[in-house]
Amino acid sequence: MARNTKQTSERELDILIAGAGYVGLATAVSIARAQPGLKVALVDAAPEGVWQRDGRASAIAAAACRMLKRLDCWTEIEPEAQPITEMEITDSRTADVVRPVFLTFGGEAGEGEPFAHMVPNRVMNGALRARAAESGIEIIEGVAVDGFANMGGYVTVSLADGTTCRTRLLVAADGVRSRLRDMAGIKTVKWDYGQSGIVCTVAHERPHNGRAEEHFLPAGPFATLPLTGNRSSIVWTERTEDADRLVKEDDLVFEQELELRFGLKLGEIRVEGPRRAWPLGLTLAREFVKPRFALAGDAAHGIHPIAGQGLNLGFKDAAALAEVIVEAERLGEDIGALDVLQRYERWRRFDTVQMGVTTDVLNRLFSNDIGPVRALRDFGLGLVERMPAMKRYFIQQASGLAPSTPRLLRGEAI
């Protein structure tokens, strides 16, 4: 039940989560469904209902799909989810007439289970909000966190509407530019790539048959990701100054530039809806937790979209944090104690740093037009193409089904 409270009041909570995006919502629902006795609430600075106008879509790995099924969200999501059945990788220049395919991925994460789906953001957010309402989770929208203080046995959180909350644990899931992370004094390792990601949706004449493609171009990767119907989601990396110019161009110029990269094998294309560009960089928090405080999702790690794993890392955070909190509560431990929260940090830190480093190296390796480097990377892609065991390993990683996967991501209850 979402509401915007304006009067001065005080709430007593067990867990307050700042940020009502997918990671915040998934964390809240996971905890509340596994341990109904815990009182969980979310606070979000975004205006009420803004999520309903989000026209983007996200790539959801098989493990995240299992989690959404366990949380009873998938029935609502599935009609608008597009399975990704195949992935092609090419390496070329924009003007090249022929784009040789160096690497293809196909197969399933499990019997009849695609390794990933494309899901509209508003549909996923709506399903998670419906489960939150059923679990009695309050969502305070359009209100920012002004500040918080650790009082020893609890945290006092001041909201911009005059509300004060007392909570045993405060979770920051408020994005890569997290204000709460800064308030907590947690430092980050970060740098700017000088690139921006252009995101838009295109309609095309012919069906994509569930195939996703990633073209490595000199300015950065250009990914086409299948949506339901004859539509695809575009994630187009360009140098920031070029991206800013392109999104401001009229439709004719933008579609001409898009066609140069998209090609015509799916027939004529047409941009649907708005196009936007976001600056790209790497951000890794030096700490994930402090006493009675934890980071999750992009607040803990912001990575390049080259591997399409940003949101899936966030879902792993949500599943791991929920599992640690619920098990601690069942054992009678203090869910906000540092030693409890450090279990979550140890579980998630290596994976996120590893993925951050991997995407950083891939972006630097493929976002250039240096002849010897191109020859080396194309040789490497061709080598992987001829190694079925290596391809199966990459499919497993893309599916999010590593051995240390939290229970919810294996489709199991906490």
Image (cartoon, helix red, strand yellow):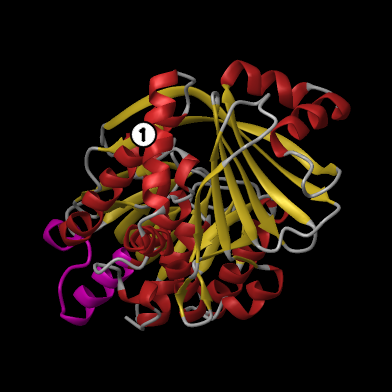
In the rendered view, tell whether residue 214 sits above or below residue 126.
above
Nearest the viewer among 55 and 223 is: 223
**194 with respect to 287 (left or right):** right
Assess whether residue 130 is covered by the magenta stretch. no
Q: Position of residue 160 (x, y in %)?
A: 51, 43
Q: Which span is picked out in magenta?
A: 320-341
Q: Position of residue 132 (x, y in %)?
A: 53, 72
Q: Which residue is mark 1?
A: 360
Nearest the viewer among 131 and 387 is: 387
The residue depicted at 16 percent of the width and 63 percent of the height is 340
Assess whether residue 323 is covered by the magenta stretch. yes
- The amino acid marked with disc number 1 is Asp
Nearest the viewer among 336 and 373 is: 373
Nearest the viewer among 190 and 233 is: 233
Q: Position of residue 399 (x, y in %)?
A: 42, 64
Which corner quadrant of the image does residue 189 belong to? top left
